[in-house]
């Protein structure tokens, strides 16, 4: 029974996050010129759903409320980097790149996190295999992005850079959070990070001159927002952390490499976006990089 539930949670995360890139693209078309405002709505919608859930999951006591300096640091890093910053960059980047390209570039974040951890946490130094894995991941990004002098200043290149920066922000937030001992429940810290991240993005959108209006929003936009906030954020995060508790972080991270496959299928079916040879090849290199970076942990899993 537990194995069936674990498989169901894994599939749920892959489907939910795979569909999120398509939902972002759909929603952006309904609120042009307001990607950060749209990102804020996603986070705030999710926080309204997941905060009560976090309070229930934490059980008796107040483990769902951040109190210590470590708790506050984890929530702050989560809000600035993992939720707020990453979503703002991702939504802005997806204005000019396809859903599939965005999902592949974003899938690099576990590889980046390993490289950053080796710099920030001395005992997590990289082996030669891991160095090769990081380089393969970077090569995969280059294959997907296909940079050239004629395209470096174009909107597509800027969009790819923003999505890559989004993956970098997730990695920075994840590594930085590990340096602070926290007593708060993991789902609860994520819920507060979603809430704070959404609140911080509202003035950011205002400073960027984005319109705070949903006058032109269609039912499709609200469906996309509901999907992003409830299914792909509140539900997926709760499922993700449940998986970590059941099968460990390394196995759970593997879900990141099923997400682009789901996105590719959905983007072709609903948006008519192309899946190019460069996209497939770059994704394969990123997956190989991940396997090299986590070679020992994966070997223990299959032993």
Image (cartoon, helix red, strand yellow):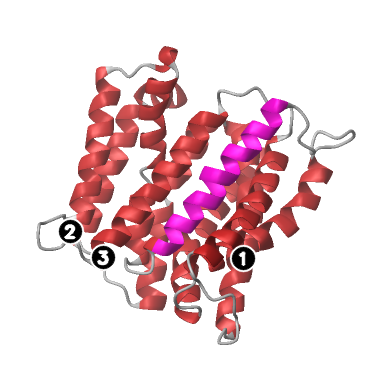
Q: Quadrant of residue 206?
A: bottom right
Along the line of sight, which residue is nearer the eye, 157 or 46? Answer: 157
Callout 3: few (<14), some (14-19), or many (20+) C-alpha neighbours within 10 Å?
some
Residue 104 shows in the view? no
Q: Residue at x 43, y 71 (%)?
A: 25
C-alpha gap between disc 2 and disc 3:
8 Å
Q: Earlier in the sequence, mark 2 or mark 1?
A: 1
Q: Decide which of tag 3 and tag 1 comes sooner along the chain.
A: 1
* 264 sits left or right of 245 in the view: left
Residue corresponding to mark 1: 41
Q: Is residue 262 above or below residue 284?
A: below
Residue 107 image position (x, y, % from top left): 38, 47
Residue interval drawn in magenta: 69-92
Q: CA distance from mark 2 to mark 1?
A: 31 Å
Question: Which residue matches tag 3?
Answer: 156
Residue 59 falls left or right of residue 182: right
Residue 258 visible? The answer is yes
Q: Which mark is residue 244?
A: none
Q: Residue at x 28, y 60 (%)?
A: 158
Residue 272: percent from left, percent from top: 33, 77
Q: Which residue is mark 2?
A: 152
- Out of 96 and 37, give the one closest to the viewer: 37
Q: Give neighbour class at mark 1: few <14, some 14-19, many 20+ (Cα, 10 Å).
A: many
The magenta stretch spans residue 73: yes
């Amino acid at each position: 029974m537990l194995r069936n539930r674990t498989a169901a949670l894994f599939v749920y995360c892959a489907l939910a996050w795979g569909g999120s890139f398509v939902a972002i693209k759909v929603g952006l078309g309904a609120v042009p010129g307001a990607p950060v405002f749209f990102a804020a709505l996603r986070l705030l919608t999710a926080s309204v759903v997941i905060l009560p859930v976090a309070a229930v999951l934490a059980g008796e006591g107040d483990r769902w409320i951040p109190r210590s300096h470590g708790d506050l640091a984890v929530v702050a890093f989560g809000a600035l980097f993992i939720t707020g910053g990453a979503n703002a960059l991702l939504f802005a980047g997806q204005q000019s790149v396809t859903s599939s390209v965005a999902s592949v570039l974003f899938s690099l974040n576990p590889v980046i996190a390993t490289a950053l951890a080796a710099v920030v946490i001395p005992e997590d130094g990289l082996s030669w295999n891991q160095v090769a894995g990081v380089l393969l991941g970077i090569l995969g990004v280059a294959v997907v992005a296909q940079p050239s002098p004629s395209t470096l200043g174009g909107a597509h290149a800027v969009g790819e850079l923003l999505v890559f920066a989004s993956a970098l922000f997730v990695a920075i937030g994840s590594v930085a959070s590990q340096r602070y001992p926290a007593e708060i429940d993991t789902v609860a810290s994520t819920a507060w990070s979603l809430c704070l991240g959404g609140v911080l993005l509202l003035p950011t959108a205002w400073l960027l001159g984005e319109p705070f209006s949903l006058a032109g929003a269609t039912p499709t936009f609200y469906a996309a927002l509901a999907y992003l906030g409830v299914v792909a954020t509140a539900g997926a995060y709760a499922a993700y952390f449940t998986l970590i508790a059941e099968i460990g972080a390394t196995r759970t991270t593997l879900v990141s490499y099923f997400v682009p496959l789901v996105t590719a299928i959905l983007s072709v079916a609903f948006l008519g976006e192309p899946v190019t040879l460069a996209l497939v090849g770059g994704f394969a290199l990123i997956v190989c990089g991940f396997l090299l970076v986590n070679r020992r942990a994966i070997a223990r899993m299959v032993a």
